[in-house]
Amino acid sequence: MPPDPITYCGIAPTPLLLATRWNFDPPLLVGLALLLGGIALGKGDRRALVAGWVVLAIIFVSPLCALTVALFSARVVHHLLLVAVAMPLLAWGWRGVPGGRVPVGIAAVAHVAVFWFWHAPPPYAAALADPAVYWAMQASLAATALLFWRAVFDAQAQPLATTLALVGTVAQMGLLGAILAFAPEPLYAPHLATTAPWGLGPVTDQQLGGLIMWVAGAIPYGAALALLLRGWARGWRLAA
């Protein structure tokens, strides 16, 4: 049986200890404080930006950080909160602020490629074994997601390209989730010995993570597409 991984978020917690596992890592808290200060002093929609900041704090400071060491399904929730909740909130808050834009198609490909890369078993295991790799994972997921959502919310974006990018992103999220949900064997070695205290086997935990990715992962992208289509339709009616 492999040993419990010791990661940036610590060792895998048990249910009884989870509530005590808050992450008060000083560099993390300084980074969050600097981000909040930048939001307070900078431009943009502060309500959306603060909401995105709160989600980031929940992801990295709350016991969810520790839970992701024990359960792959919790890691999926963590990643979805990062790329599909926090980053679109920040992108929406910074819409209209210059800088950091690439064509939506390129941004979508980068977002999808990085997401798949870090959910391949070897890079995933490396991220849990080394804090530097862990932060490389978090930073690359966040950066490519932010670029994607800024491109989606760009007022100059082409409706067809943006629609195709969002539909394609929903499709890939569902595909990856389905692969994980139907995999007959556990794919993630770091969780082989960490799920039992939570009443789950590693395969069941992996299937739950795949189902969350498959179903819940599509919701933010689908909601963004619906809102954008409604806005474009209103614009077309006004132009007519």
Image (spheres, rainbow, N blue to C red):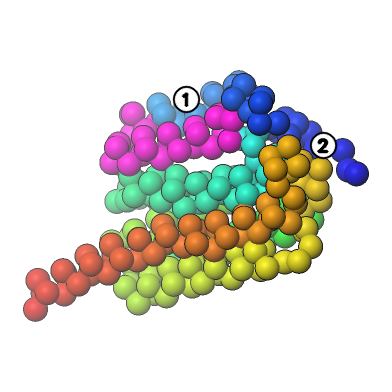
Left/right placement of residue 71 relative to residue 47 reads: right
Residue at x 73%, y 43% (from the top left corner):
195
Dot 1: within a 10 Å radius of its alpha carbon, few (fewer than 14), some, or many (20 or more) residues?
A: few
Q: Quadrant of residue 162?
A: bottom left
Give the quarter of the figure containing the C terminus.
Answer: bottom left
Dot 2: within a 10 Å radius of its alpha carbon, few (fewer than 14), some, or many (20 or more) residues?
A: some
Provide residue 127's location: percent of width, then percent of height.
73, 45
Q: Quadrant of residue 196?
A: top right
Residue picked out by circle 1? 33
Provide residue 79's location: percent of width, then percent of height.
57, 49
Residue at x 48%, y 57% (from the top left corner):
216
In space, the residues marked 1 and 2 are separated at their CA atoms by: 32 Å
Classify mark 2: helix, strand or loop.
loop
Find out whether the residues at labels 1 and 2 contact each other: C-beta distance under 8 Å. Answer: no
Residue at x 57%, y 60% (from the top left corner):
211
Q: Amino acid at mark 2?
A: Asp
Asked if residue 55 is among those painted magenta in the image, a careful observer would answer: yes
Left/right placement of residue 229 relative to residue 208 reads: left
Q: Which residues are magenta?
A: 38-64
Residue picked out by circle 2? 4
